[in-house]
Image (cartoon, rainbow, N blue to C red):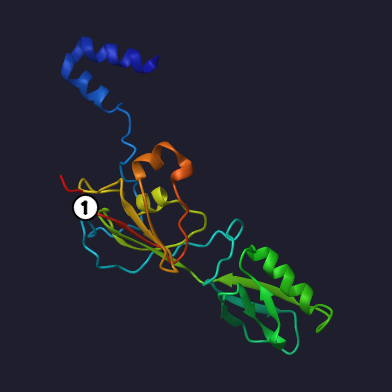
Amino acid sequence: MELLKSFGNILKKWGWLPALLMLAGCQDVDPYTPIPQGNVPASAGGTNHSYASAPVIPLDTTNYTLRVGDQLQVSFFDITPAITPITDEIKDDGTITLIYNEKFQAAGKSISELQTMVHDRYVPAYVKYMTVNITPANRLYTVQGEVRAPNRYGYSGHMTLLQAIATAGGFTDYARKRSVQVTRADNRQFKVNCVKALADPDLDVEIFPGDKIYVPQQWW
């Protein structure tokens, strides 16, 4: 109501032009308008594939499910003698190997689930007390092609394709949005129609660490 009163006052006092300008500020937002990102390199744009250093984003350890290829640092506390932290990558069979040559099924587990598994394996079988802390290394995904800020970005947890593109500044005016290519860390490739994905969230595929996204140029 207050907006309508202000609009009427502008009409009476100044005429149509300021009123039209005010209306312009109330237009619907273009769904492909880039989301402002504080970590987007100012000089990035077009199809420039040179990368600045990737922004460091803390991993959401609450919801993240561990996958093959994730690198983990496992630290042991409240134990004597002290044990140096172990860094291991989740192997193709989904396991990591820790002290005393014990193997743990890590793929498909959350961080907290794996920490509990490790603790319960060693306590009390090997030691009386132990605190386990598992920290995943900062993983990256890459966005290339017709986005405004092509770069490598830090993976922060659950993320979809459209969210990853938005993080890279959004599509350029020349983007072929209907044929966006995703390459997984294991080199599997597929294409996504981002126009349809915008209308149907089920088509907005999840992005994982190590994925590469390529937005091709539109040809008219």
Q: Secondary structure at mark 1?
A: loop
The residue sitting at 31% across, 35% down in the picture is 30
State whether residue 25 appears in this view.
yes
Q: Is residue 91 above or below residue 167?
A: below
Write down the residue under mark 1.
Answer: 217
Q: Quick check: 39 left or right of 134?
A: left
Q: Nearer the viewer, residue 86 or 183?
A: 183
At label 1, counting other C-alpha atoms closer than 10 Å, the crowd grade (few under 14, some 14-19, many 20 or more) is some
Which quadrant: the N terminus? top left
The residue sitting at 34% across, 12% down in the picture is 5
Q: Is residue 49 above or below residue 131?
A: above
Q: Quick check: 76 left or right of 143?
A: right
Which quadrant: the C terminus? top left
Q: Is residue 183 above or below residue 79?
A: above
Task: Estimate the x, y position of residue 123 in percent, counting from the top left.
Answer: 81, 77
Task: Estimate the x, y position of residue 109 in percent, counting from the top left.
Answer: 65, 64
Task: Estimate the x, y position of residue 185 in percent, counting from the top left.
Answer: 44, 68
The residue sitting at 72% across, 88% down in the picture is 100
Task: Estimate the x, y position of residue 117 in percent, counting from the top left.
Answer: 73, 70
Q: Quick check: 89 left or right of 43?
A: right
Q: At label 1, which amino acid type do we have?
A: Gln
